[in-house]
Amino acid sequence: MRSDTEPLSLQKVKGFVFDVDGTLAHRGPDGRAIPQPGAVRVLQRIRASGRPFVLFTNGSHKSSAAIARGLHEDGLPISDDQVLTPIDSTISYLRRNHRGRPALLLATDATRELMERSGVPLASAEEAEVVFVAHVDEIEMATLERAARAVKRGAPLLTGSYVSAYAGAHGPIFSRGAMVTAAIAKAAGVNPRVVGKPSRAAVAELREHLRLPTDELAVIGDDVNMDIALGHIGGSLTVLVRSGISDQAQLDRVPVRRRPHAIIDGVADLLELL
């Protein structure tokens, strides 16, 4: 890994992991992704080099393939298998650690259906042996109470994301999944386990998806506490872009060991380094 005095080089990087919102794109008021300057050219150049890349978003409202199709329609040159979400890493995590245990899913209908098709047995009430929180559009207090009681009884509380917000075109977009998770955690008196970004579950998903050791990857994102933290967990090269959620004040509060290896103004700055 390079030191702070060495110039950034991506020549020896074998694969790339990109955040989406605030890094490659910003969401407009209609929810559509607006590619950042240089984002399309960066992805095209990496593809031309023969090196793999994947977009890891913390969006958990629908399947990774559906998200990929939407981003492709919005102009990013990606295929259906080049997006990962917390749903992907959660399914793998449950198979490794809680196979066959009924899970209470606080999620959209699309996510619930996807996880059920993937073999996750669903629980409807306090018989749940696992509780998982993803994005929700609406939620009833009774559902929160059932989840909190299950967690109080010993079910692990898993969440796709526990960051408060992500970067939108007109300011931060607050995470509903994090809000719901916080309510359950407070009521049950526990700390949730993140299985999206940043987590070892996400690192394992990257390793499996890209078929590369994570210390051979570069992780590029706008959130020092999510994207950069993910890279550090996997021993990857980390690059923070200033086009998103993390400002200098936030960066200054992060211990030196958790700071990015390099900082760039926007993803277009990668073009001269590839």
Image (tube, rainbow, N blue to C red):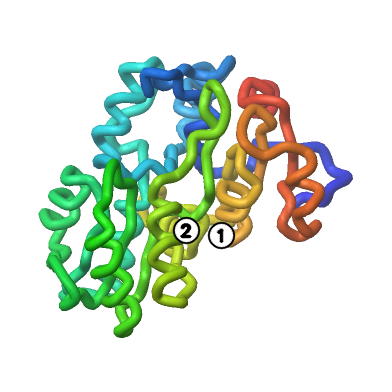
Q: Quadrant of residue 187?
A: bottom left
Residue nearer the viewer, 12 or 257:
257
Horizontal relation, residue 221 to residue 98: left or right: right
- Number of the label disc, if any, that sits on residue 168: none
Residues marked 2 and 1 touching at CB (< 8 Å)? yes
Residue 203 is labelled as 2
Locate residue 32: give its quadrant: top left
Who's the residue at 82% across and 51% down the image?
Answer: 3
Q: According to the image, label 1 marks what residue? A: 234
The location of residue 66, given as percent across then percent down, is: 24, 33
| Corner quadrant of residue 31 | top left
Q: Identify the element where label 1 is drawn.
A: loop
The percent position of residue 54, horizontal first and vertical second, equals: 43, 39
Q: Where does the image place residue 266, in percent across and percent down from the top left?
A: 66, 25
Looking at the image, can residue 194 be seen? yes
Residue drawn at x 23%, y 77% is 129
| Left or right relative to 194: residue 73 | left
Is residue 206 among what the camera can see?
no
Q: Residues within 10 Å of mark 2 (few under 14, many from 20)?
A: many
The residue closer to the viewer here, 232 or 191, is: 191
